[in-house]
């Protein structure tokens, strides 16, 4: 756990994200019909999901660790990762909706990708409700860890597998090419990959700060 | 070369045989208990029949509806929603009806995997029987032509298998967290929505009599979801049952 107290990756995260403000907004992007300049949303929408995925993977890791060891810190790490993941989830949905308004015409057009994202959001809200429904700490930690591990593969199927099999307008689904296939030229890659890495680090950073706050709270509330 | 089995292979084969044996005995016990009381079966059957009847009466208030173009769509969606609620009610009981001391007894004689597997298989059998009967009852009250009856029936069977695997695991979680129905619904609906979407699509194409090659992708998705759910249930249940 020494990693979370180190500084280098936080500096790297800030630099990477700041660099995308220049490379993403100023550098040239291919001009495509309908999409036009909204293609730049790629640098801000997809990294949100990458950040979400990163912290959700971390939370599954700590849920597994909790079931193995039964240490309370692991449960706190798992729940704070899910909380951060939900923040990035919301941002991913919002940036997606904004993009959809300018390309598909509506904020919410009932596209399969949007609908499955909404359902998977409910899945993780259910995780938080499940936590609230149990009073006893150890039991809560154990059962929510189990549900977290159970929910993760289903979230993956919902967001990343099912929409690809239906007629979705979302790039990369239903026969639509993802931007990576044809449009992502080398100029865009300079902005896209740093954004993915940078926002993943930012998500991790937020999760570690929340986790450390929870640790301090826990210490303060402990009965000695 | 059967005589060249290594030590670990022998242990694994023995463990699998033990698991199959325990699952078989527990399954027999579940079926026997149900056969004696017939409570779950009759209860859910009555639930399905009364729901279908309520739908029948409500839709009959609008004369001419059965000839309208939306009728087959409503028919299909209504059937799956009825099945969804019937199976939640049937399967939610599977862990809640067991008393604490009886559960403790099972855990002392059988492995946790055998317990969750036997419950899942029992629920699959129960739901397959119930949904077949429900389909017959539904078809009697709401006449409708099925383009491909065999594949529609297959979709119904796949549906009962998927409902059973998902709801059994969720009811195990919910029963540990205070046994309430709200929690069961909150936890299971996000998981079951993708399943029911695929099922509705599958059964709609069976109803329209679409070429059978269209089915395989959706059947593959359902099987994949079931495999994921069963695998995670087998991995996680051993941690869940210990109090």
Image (tube, coloured by chain):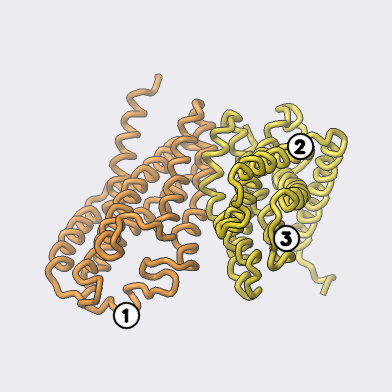
Chain colours: A orange, B yellow
Estimate the spatial distance between the alpha carbons at disc 1 and disc 3, rounded to whole Å. Answer: 43 Å
Q: Nearer the viewer, residue B34 or B228?
A: B34
Considering every residue shown, the one lying at the far front of the view is B63
From the viewer's perspective, is B215 left or right of A153? right
**Mark 3 Cα-neighbour bin, 10 Å: few <14, some 14–19, many ≥20:** some
Q: Are marks 1 and 3 on the same chain?
A: no
N-terminal of the two: label 2 or label 3? Answer: 2
In the picture of the structure, the residue carrying the numbered disc 3 is: B153
Element under disc 3 = helix
Identify which residue is drawn at 76% across, 66% down.
B6
Q: Is residue A184 visible?
A: yes
In the picture of the structure, the residue carrying the numbered disc 2 is: B40
- Looking at the rendered image, the disc whose residue lies closer to the viewer, 2 or 3, is 3
Estimate the spatial distance between the alpha carbons at disc 2 and disc 3, rounded to whole Å. Answer: 23 Å
State the image coordinates of residue B112 (x, y, percent, origin top left): 70, 43
Q: Nearer the viewer, residue A97 or A197?
A: A97
Identify which residue is drawn at 76% across, 46% down.
B126
State the image coordinates of residue A99 (x, y, percent, origin top left): 27, 61
In the picture of the structure, the residue carrying the numbered disc 1 is: A182
Tally of numbered discs: 3
From the viewer's perspective, is A74 left or right of B86? left
What's the mark number on residue A102? none
């Amino acid at each position: 756990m020494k990693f979370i107290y180190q500084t280098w990756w936080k500096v790297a995260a800030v630099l990477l994200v700041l660099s995308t403000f220049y490379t993403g907004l100023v550098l040239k992007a291919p001009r495509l019909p309908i999409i036009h300049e909204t293609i730049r949303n790629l640098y801000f929408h997809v990294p949100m999901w990458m950040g979400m995925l990163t912290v959700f993977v971390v939370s599954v890791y700590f849920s597994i660790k909790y079931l193995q060891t039964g240490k309370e810190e692991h449960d706190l790490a798992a729940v704070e990762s899910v909380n951060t993941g939900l923040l990035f989830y919301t941002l991913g949905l919002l940036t997606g909706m904004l993009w959809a308004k300018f390309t598909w015409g509506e904020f919410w057009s009932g596209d399969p990708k949007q609908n499955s994202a909404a359902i998977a959001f409910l899945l993780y809200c259910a995780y938080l409700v499940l936590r609230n429904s149990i009073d006893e700490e150890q039991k809560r930690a154990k059962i929510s860890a189990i549900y977290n591990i159970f929910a993760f593969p289903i979230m993956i199927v919902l967001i990343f597998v099912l929409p690809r099999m239906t007629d979705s307008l979302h790039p990369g689904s239903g026969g639509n090419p993802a931007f990576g296939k044809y449009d992502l030229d080398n100029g865009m890659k300079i902005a896209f990959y740093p954004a993915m890495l940078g926002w993943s680090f930012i998500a991790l950073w937020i999760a570690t700060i929340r986790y450390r706050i929870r640790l301090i709270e826990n210490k303060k509330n402990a009965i000695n | 070369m059967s005589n060249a089995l290594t030590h670990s292979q022998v242990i694994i084969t023995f463990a699998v045989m033990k698991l199959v044996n325990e699952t078989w005995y527990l399954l027999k016990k579940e079926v026997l208990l149900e056969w004696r009381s017939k409570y779950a079966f009759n209860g859910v059957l009555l639930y399905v029949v009364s729901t279908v009847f309520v739908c029948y009466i409500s839709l009959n208030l609008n004369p001419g509806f059965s000839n309208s173009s939306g009728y087959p769509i409503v028919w299909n969606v209504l059937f799956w929603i009825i099945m969804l609620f019937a199976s939640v009610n049937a399967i939610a009981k599977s862990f809640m009806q067991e008393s604490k001391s009886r559960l403790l007894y099972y855990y002392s004689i059988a492995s946790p995997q055998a317990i969750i597997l036997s419950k899942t298989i029992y629920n699959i059998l129960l739901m397959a029987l119930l949904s077949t009967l429900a389909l017959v009852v539904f078809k009697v009250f709401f006449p409708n032509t099925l383009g491909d009856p065999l594949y529609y029936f297959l979709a119904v069977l796949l549906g009962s298998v998927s409902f059973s695997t998902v709801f059994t695991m969720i009811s195990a979680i919910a029963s540990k967290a205070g046994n309430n129905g709200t929690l069961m619904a909150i936890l299971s609906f996000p998981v079951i929505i993708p399943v029911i979407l695929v099922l509705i699509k599958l059964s709609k194409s069976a109803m329209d009599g679409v070429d059978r090659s269209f089915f395989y992708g959706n059947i593959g998705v359902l099987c994949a979801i079931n495999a994921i759910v069963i695998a995670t249930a087998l991995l996680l249940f051993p941690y869940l049952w210990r109090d």
